[in-house]
Image (cartoon, helix red, strand yellow):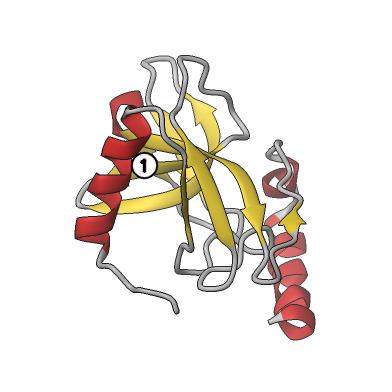
Amino acid sequence: MAHVVENEILLPEMGRMLQEGKSVRFTPTGVSMRPWIEGGRDAVVLRRVDADIRVGQVLLCKVGDRFVLHRLRAIEQDGTLVLQGDGNIVGQERCSKADVLGRVTAVYAASGRRKWLPATTLWQRLPRLVRKYGLKIYRKLFV
């Protein structure tokens, strides 16, 4: 039986556990990481972020008063992290390295099968129109 815990309680506790070196598995909500992570269905495993944060990693970060599970698109010269969900055609978030709670190390489908999670931003480099229609096709076939 699944238990639903509000993000305001769950995510800070997950951050504490990650800082202690534990891994955390949870089912995120939302559609911003489609097609690689299906919110409400797939589970992700998070681990503490080491000093080597790299573009392409999927990170759980606190952005303002909310939490996002998005891919790191770029690191600006001042160290600011630029994030964007793979399923987002527009819109990016920015945060500092101190706002990173953990990084995704594995994704599991509801069946328990481990899913492939690309480690690059190649999908996001495709033209917006290609991604837009790719996501529409994905929704028709798999959601």
Q: Position of residue 121 (x, y in %)?
A: 68, 39
The quadrant in which the C terminus is found is bottom right
Q: Quadrant of residue 56?
A: top right
Residue at 59 percent of width and 65 percent of height: 42
Q: Position of residue 29 (x, y in %)?
A: 45, 68
Is residue 79 visible in the rendered image? The answer is yes
Residue at 20 percent of width and 57 percent of height: 9
Q: Residue 143, relative to residue 98: is it above or below? A: below
Q: Position of residue 100 (x, y in %)?
A: 36, 34
Q: Secondary structure at mark 1?
A: strand
Q: Residue furthest front?
A: 1
Q: Quadrant of residue 113?
A: bottom right
The quadrant in which the N terminus is found is bottom left
Write down the residue under mark 1: 61
Q: Is residue 94 left or right of residue 112?
A: left
Is residue 95 visible in the rendered image? The answer is no
Q: Residue 132, relative to residue 76: is it above or below? A: below
Q: Residue 59, relative to residue 134: is it above or below? A: above
Residue type at mark 1? Cys
Q: Nearer the viewer, residue 135 or 128?
A: 135
Q: Nearer the viewer, residue 140 or 106?
A: 106
